[in-house]
Image (tube, rainbow, N blue to C red):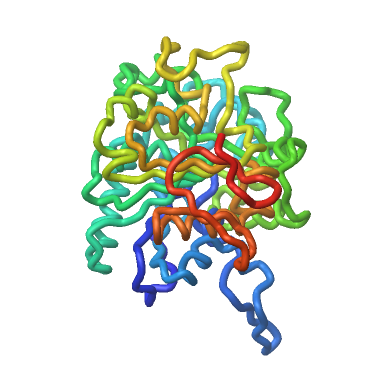
Amino acid sequence: MEEWFSDAQGPVVLMLHGRSVPSRPAFAYGGFPTVTGGGLTIPNPLWHYNWAGQLAEQGIRVFMMDLPGMGLSSRHPRVFDEPRNAYKRDQKRLAPFPLATPDAGPYPSPFWSHDQNSDMLDVEQVIHFITGITGATKVHLIGYSAASFVLGPFAMQHPDLVHSLFLLAPIFPPFGYSDPPPFMTDPQSAPEKLQCPMFIQDWDTDLGDPSATQSFLGSWNSEQLMGAEREGFIAADLWANILSEDATGQSWGRGVNRIRNPLWWGWSKQNVVQDKVVLGKQVPVCIVYGLCDLQVFAKIRGVRELPGPGQQDLSPSAGPPFSPKWLFDEIQGKQKLMIAIPKTGHFMPWETSHGLLHKFSADWITRHKVWPPRPALEPRTPVSTGSYELSSLNTFISV
């Protein structure tokens, strides 16, 4: 766990990473306000990217955590240091070291080192630590991407510990597992992608296999083609930051990101609909996503039409379809806000719209309202509920 600016006495926030990018590169990319070199201290030109730092400058006390198997947290060596535990379709990325060729045998550790219960317990323990040192009784939760699998169910089960929920590009599978899946006691019967302990991502290798983990650059470039905007240098620099969190991963293949593969449940349409008293009521919810995001709106391959909210379920699965709009519709309380940002994809913390993300999250945490980013001399009307799209004139359009 890491804290930014412990002298801040305002609201207390815990930030949780998504599936593949640890908390420090996700929330504190850019480093400190100044940099020192050659005897000189100068302003840091990347400081404006630091989401945690920008929140702290607004008087918010910010904590970040890495779940076990991510970033600077511990990794079980028997699981993560064994290359044969990597997803079979990703193992080509491990040549020539530590695997010359993909391994055809079973996974040496065919079990889940992390699951819904263990991840939520880790979050609960960190929150109790935070409240113990700050005196706060509740914290605001910020989750990026797949953090929603952990923070959403956690908020529903522990509203006494949560002030509000801010979800950036949340992954929400309406037809996901509502309860622990039956194959937990027999991993070999699980879907292929749920049998492996970890996935392997590298910088730019296209394996030509749609079932393999997409490369870091390939994933981001696909959204850039949709209109997501970023500075030219940032992809390579961010990748270097991600690799710096994993010394072992740096030595594998051409340098890889070892991505843990937890087994999650309890974050489906059924779970959210059954929650009548927490989300949007005891715990206000704000959802922000980019209109160029190809990950939060992933579809099922070969399925063109999906049932609408509240209609017939598909078979439960851990994968697509995903939809933040579906999540918003199924939240039963009225204290819910959703904002879509143009020219922005799944990598919003490092794209040109990152300043909007900083502003909207600070507004939400401090006042549970969000103001449009218009010039200060013009009248601005905040929004606190409803679904909106940010227009080219920086106004909120109800959708």
Give the residue displayed 53% in from the left and 66% down from the top. 54
Using the image, determine if residue 308 lies above or below residue 205.
above
Location of residue 278 by image quarter: top left
Residue at 55% over, 38% down: 398
Screen quadrant of the C terminus: top right
> In which quadrant is the N terminus drawn?
bottom left
Please provide percent x and percent y for residue 57.
49, 71
The image position of residue 388, as x and y in percent, is 55, 40
Q: From this viewpoint, is residue 204 visible?
A: no
Residue at x-position 59% and y-position 33% = 295
Q: Is residue 59 left or right of residue 351?
A: left
- Eyeballing the image, is 264 above or below 184? below
| Residue at the image point whose x is 57% and y is 25% from the top | 88
Q: Quadrant of residue 109?
A: top left
Give the percent coordinates (x, y) of residue 384. Answer: 43, 48
Q: Would you place residue 58 above or below residue 171 in this image?
A: below
Query: Is 35 left or right of 382, judged from the image as shown?
Result: right
Please name whichever residue, 126 or 386, is drawn nearer the observer in this view of the structure: 386
Q: Tag count in the figure? A: 0
Residue farthest front in this picture: 379
**Nearer-the-camera pick, 122 or 69:** 122
Q: Is residue 283 left or right of residue 31?
A: left
Above/below status of 377 relative to 338? below
Image quarter of residue 195: top left
The answer to whether residue 168 of the structure is visible from this angle is: yes
On screen, residue 209 versus residue 15, left or right, reads right
